[in-house]
Image (tube, grey):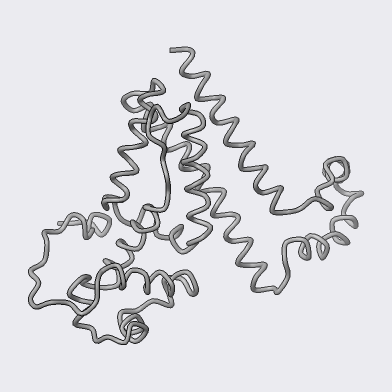
Amino acid sequence: MTSKFADSDWLRPPRTRNGQPTLSREQILRAAMEILDAEGPGGLSMRRLGTKLGSGATSLYWHVANKDELLELAVDEVIGEIYVPEPGDTSWRIGVSVWANGMRSALLRHPWVIGLLGTHPTLGPNAMRMGERIVLLLSGAGFAGMPLSHASAVINAHAIGAATTEAAAHAAIKRGGLDMAGVAEQMKPYVEKMADEHPAYDKWRREAGVAVQDQQQLLDEGFAFGLERLLDGLELWLAKG
């Protein structure tokens, strides 16, 4: 019996297609991603997509069997936006930084992808190309076997985790009608009222100047700090041989 996880478009044999489509796969994916970026997976349906494209279902189904398959294609399309440098183009640390920052940026541009990661194997052509580049990049640094897989997973986890938290914050802020600075200002009276109960936290908050700093800059700096410490740890592991 095939599991739901393994029920992937990439694992099924090609479908027999009759006739000629009036739309290209690229057109369908572009329109689907516009809906997904605006409303998330809940706003996407084959009927809605057909209406947006001004086309009947036949043209859509020539390329995709259903919404799940369309989502798989869309996820792979987003993965195609993530650049991983070729080995030799730069140092492995810079290469990994480019990859990790690209992953975070792509997920923030398309936050609907976050909830779809892991629901199916990532075996699309863009995912496989990215995986090939990552293997070459990390093996060139000295990783091999399962340690290479673990190093890749750690980097991906940092990028995905940061993007997940940040995307959720942006969505909540958008619903509330305030920017990040406005939310920080709104929270300030409550945080100051709690200072006596949490003196260590209040002392740190004032020393760090959290309340007056640009909140997006803090997120960017926090991601960069965490990534650099991960790379320090991986570099130390390599040095120990």
Q: Report x, y in % for residue 193.
A: 90, 57
Please, which residue is most extreme toward the front here?
89
Residue at image coords 77%, 61%: 181
Q: Nearer the viewer, residue 91 or 151?
A: 91
Please, which residue is most extreme toward the top here?
240
Q: Report x, y in % for residue 161.
A: 53, 48
Residue at image coords 69%, 53%: 216
In the image: residue 227, left or right of residue 40: right
Residue at image coords 83%, 41%: 208
Q: Nearer the viewer, residue 164 or 181?
A: 181
Q: Report x, y in % for residue 159.
A: 51, 45
In the image: residue 100, left or right of residue 168: left
| The N terminus lies in quadrant | bottom left
Q: Nearer the viewer, residue 150 or 217?
A: 217
In the image: residue 193, left or right of residue 93: right
Residue 70 falls in which quadrant of the image? bottom left
How many labels, in total? 0
Residue 2 falls in which quadrant of the image? bottom left
Q: Report x, y in % for residue 85.
A: 41, 37
Residue 130 falls in which quadrant of the image? top left
| The C terminus lies in quadrant | top left
In the image: residue 199, left or right of residue 171: right
Identify whether 49 is placed above or below 81.
Answer: below
Identify whether 49 is placed above or below 235.
Answer: below
